[in-house]
């Protein structure tokens, strides 16, 4: 189908076409027309011209026009376009001053960034770090801008270096958004010193990872001082105070702040564990002598001394073990376990809101789309099409993570946009014939806009995180691409100091190198593996396919000959690893492209319906939910496929009231029994 004829409509037809669009689409078109007008005006446009040509159908009065124009200028500034004000002084008192508005064509542009193939490789790895985390879309947008600016080199990503940053839950996403928009936040927090839950109002200055934990650093308004907050101690969802703003300290760098933070001391908890259970916990624990002051464990139980630094992290783990573990001391660990179990039990007993799943194809949790999101996408779409002429329309939609219908709506708005009251050749000229998209008139939108703060943070923090990989840190590409991006990002790049990623270097480099070598040579490996879900050891012959990580926890994906399918193995759960002398024999290739998925649902897996609170909605993305339904309280109902369901009661207990199983009913009942049995141990 050829839609080029639409672009030849007069401005009257364009306005008539716009009247049938949704209100948000009309606003998007107005912002786009205003942007094009100000970009293409050499001397600037007077307010009267703008009202007549851009706002004639939107503003009924001068006051309404003024409010709308000021709001639109702020929106364009948020997109990276600074509206300049030019004042011409009159010749006399009878000749008043004239104010004109324009946008400099170079002021908002992303500078050209020339990258070598090695630099592109490093940059792609950095952008993929955030695949399932809050900055994933920002990293994708930034890469798309760079590709439109300088063209993506044809590079291959190394099979043995695929690190990722583990999502830190919904609180992380909300804090990143508030930090970059400079809004205070409110949340409930379990203080480490008092063990009491308190409400905090904080100006978020920075987020960073240390000692395997994410920390918020900011100004605590209640205490009028800088404070550190561990995200694992948040006991409520984060509320963003969008009507308030703050100014962070100049040059704040969260990495420097966290460098002065001492690691928590190593302590020991006494835990009773059922005989022959919890092999992973036993592996890092020591038996407790029979003369312990608390006496001997009951028959069928063993008493262990479990090392820990963070009470909340150990409490989360022990809660997941349900009736197979009971804390003897200290009280803070027992309290942490009971609080999670009690929260899980209360959520299981809570009434269920009515819900309806959204239509659409399986994918990530749906997020509300706004006119700002649409315009931001269009500003990336035009330069992308200029540099990728003739792509199939579905390929374009896939590149932007939207449906074909959403893309066609974008294109219809674009081809109805142009110079105010202009002729047909002064409109954006986009056509798609036989489902292939071409653009021949871009009206100064052919170059990508400079990075937003989110985009600069996503790439620069990702590059900083890659410093933990020796094979990258030793080369010059990582340093050179970081310097180039810092120069291109400008002020937004300086604000990247508010975010610091975790260490991604592996603990066991011997096993990692053996797996990497086997991948390169096409050799099988024999391993003895501890399965935490099955709580057992097994021996397997596998064809290794690729290595990847979540923070500094490394995995390798392999074809398992025992299971006759793809499996993921954690390096820290390998008891023994060695080549078996055989070449790989399976034709199976890695599934899902790059990066590897920690969880790969199959059609024959069990479809489980879960409910998530506002604090736990990020789990829908972590486990690749197929469908979601938004609840009035900010939570979600999600459908997720699980290959093994026996561990789901542990999953519910671990998250302490953030998730519950709705269907199948037998799994919901199993989780209730698991939690009730665990709580019964603490009844006395």
Image (cartoon, rainbow, N blue to C red):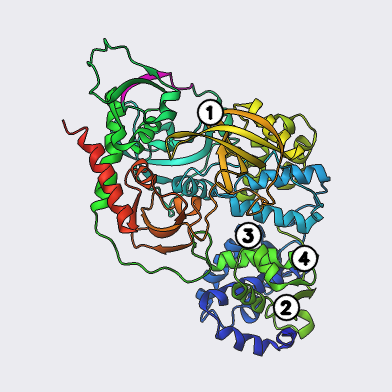
Q: Is residue 549 left or right of residue 202?
A: right
Q: Is residue 596 left or right of residue 268?
A: right
Where disc 3 sits, the SS reads loop
- Image coordinates for residue 153, horizontal then vertical, percent: 82, 52
> Residue at point 37% right, 56% down?
610
What residue is shown with label 1?
Answer: 258
Q: Quadrant of residue 356?
A: bottom left
| Label ID, residue 446 | 4
Is 271 inside the magenta-drawn segment? yes
In the rendered image, the quadrant that contains the C terminus is: top left
Where disc 2 sits, the SS reads loop
Q: What secondary structure characterizes most of the magenta part?
A: strand
> Residue at point 25% right, 46% down?
673
Check if mark 2's residue and mark 4's residue have beta carbons within 8 Å: no
Q: Give the alpha-carbon distance from disc 4 to disc 3, as whole Å.
A: 15 Å
Q: Give the alpha-carbon distance from disc 1 to disc 3, as whole Å.
A: 32 Å
Tag 2 or tag 1, which sits nearer the N-term? 1
Q: Specify start and end residues of the magenta stretch as a single range.
A: 263-272
Q: Nearer the viewer, residue 352 or 100?
A: 352
What residue is shown with label 3?
Answer: 79
Is 650 inside the magenta-drawn segment? no
Q: Give the alpha-carbon distance from disc 2 to disc 3, as whole Å.
A: 30 Å
Check if mark 4's residue and mark 1's residue have beta carbons within 8 Å: no
- Image coordinates for residue 297, horizontal then vertical, percent: 25, 21
Tag 3 or tag 2, which sits nearer the N-term? 3
What residue is shown with label 2?
Answer: 435
Q: Nearer the viewer, residue 482 or 614?
A: 614
Tag 3 or tag 4, which sits nearer the N-term? 3
């Amino acid at each position: 189908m050829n839609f080029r004829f639409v672009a030849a409509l007069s401005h009257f037809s364009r306005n008539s076409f716009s009247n049938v669009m949704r209100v948000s689409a009309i606003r998007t078109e107005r912002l786009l027309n205003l942007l094009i007008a100000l970009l293409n005006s050499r001397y600037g446009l007077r307010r009267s011209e703008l009202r007549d040509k851009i706002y004639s159908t939107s503003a009924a009065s001068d006051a309404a026009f003024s409010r709308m124009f000021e709001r639109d200028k702020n929106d364009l500034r948020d997109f990276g376009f600074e509206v300049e004000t030019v004042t011409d002084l009159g010749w006399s008192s009878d000749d008043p001053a004239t104010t004109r508005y324009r946008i400099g064509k170079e002021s908002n542009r992303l500078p050209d960034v020339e990258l070598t193939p090695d630099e592109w490789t490093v940059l792609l790895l950095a952008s993929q770090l955030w695949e399932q985390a809050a900055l994933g879309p920002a990293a994708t947008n930034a890469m798309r801008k760079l590709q439109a600016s300088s063209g993506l080199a044809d590079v291959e990503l190394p099979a043995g270096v695929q690190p990722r940053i583990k999502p830190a839950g919904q609180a992380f996403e909300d804090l990143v958004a508030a930090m970059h928009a400079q809004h205070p936040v409110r949340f409930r927090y379990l203080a480490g010193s008092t063990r009491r839950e308190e409400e905090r109002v904080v100006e978020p200055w920075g987020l960073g990872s240390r000692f395997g934990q994410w920390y918020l650093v900011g100004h605590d308004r209640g205490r009028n001082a800088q404070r550190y907050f561990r995200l694992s101690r948040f006991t409520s969802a984060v509320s963003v105070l969008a009507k308030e703003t703050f100014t962070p300290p100049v040059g704040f760098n969260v990495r420097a702040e966290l460098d002065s933070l001492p690691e928590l001391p190593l302590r020991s908890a006494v835990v009773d564990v059922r005989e022959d259970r919890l092999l992973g916990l036993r592996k890092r624990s020591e038996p407790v002598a029979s003369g312990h002051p608390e006496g001997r464990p009951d028959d069928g139980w063993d008493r262990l001394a479990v090392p820990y630094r963070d009470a909340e992290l150990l409490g989360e783990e022990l809660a997941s073990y349900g009736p197979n573990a009971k804390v003897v001391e200290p009280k803070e660990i027992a309290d942490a376990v009971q609080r999670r179990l009690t929260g899980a039990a209360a959520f299981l007993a809570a009434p269920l809101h009515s819900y309806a799943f959204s239509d659409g194809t399986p994918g990530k949790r749906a997020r509300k789309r706004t006119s700002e999101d649409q315009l931001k996408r269009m500003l990336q779409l035009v330069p992308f099409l200029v540099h990728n002429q003739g792509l199939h329309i579905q390929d374009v939609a896939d590149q932007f993570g939207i449906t074909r219908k959403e893309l066609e709506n974008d294109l219809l708005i674009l081809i109805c946009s142009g110079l105010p009251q202009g002729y047909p050749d002064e409109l954006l000229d986009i056509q798609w014939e036989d489902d292939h998209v071409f653009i021949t008139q871009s009206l100064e939108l052919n170059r990508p806009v400079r990075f937003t703060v989110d985009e600069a943070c996503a790439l620069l923090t990702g590059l900083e995180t890659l410093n933990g990989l020796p094979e990258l840190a030793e080369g010059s590409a990582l340093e050179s691409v970081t310097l180039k991006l810092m120069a291109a990002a400008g002020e937004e790049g300086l604000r990247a100091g508010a975010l610091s990623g975790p260490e991604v270097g592996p603990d066991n480099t011997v096993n990692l190198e053996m797996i990497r070598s086997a991948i390169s040579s096409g050799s099988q490996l024999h391993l003895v593996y501890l399965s935490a879900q099955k709580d057992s050891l097994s021996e397997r012959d596998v064809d290794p396919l690729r290595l990847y990580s979540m923070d500094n926890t490394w995995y390798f994906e392999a074809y398992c000959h025992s299971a006759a399918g793809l499996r993921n193995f954690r390096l820290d759960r390998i008891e023994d690893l060695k080549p078996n002398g055989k070449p790989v024999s399976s034709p199976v290739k890695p599934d899902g492209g790059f990066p590897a998925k920690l969880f790969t649902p199959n059609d024959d897996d069990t479809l489980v319906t879960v409910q998530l609170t506002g604090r736990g909605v990020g789990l829908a993305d972590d486990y690749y939910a197929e469908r979601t339904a938004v609840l009035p309280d900010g939570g979600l109902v999600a459908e997720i496929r699980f290959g093994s369901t026996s561990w789901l009661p542990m999953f519910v207990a671990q998250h302490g009231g953030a998730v519950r199983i709705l269907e199948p009913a037998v799994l919901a009942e199993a989780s209730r029994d698991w939690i009730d049995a665990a709580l019964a141990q603490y009844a006395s």
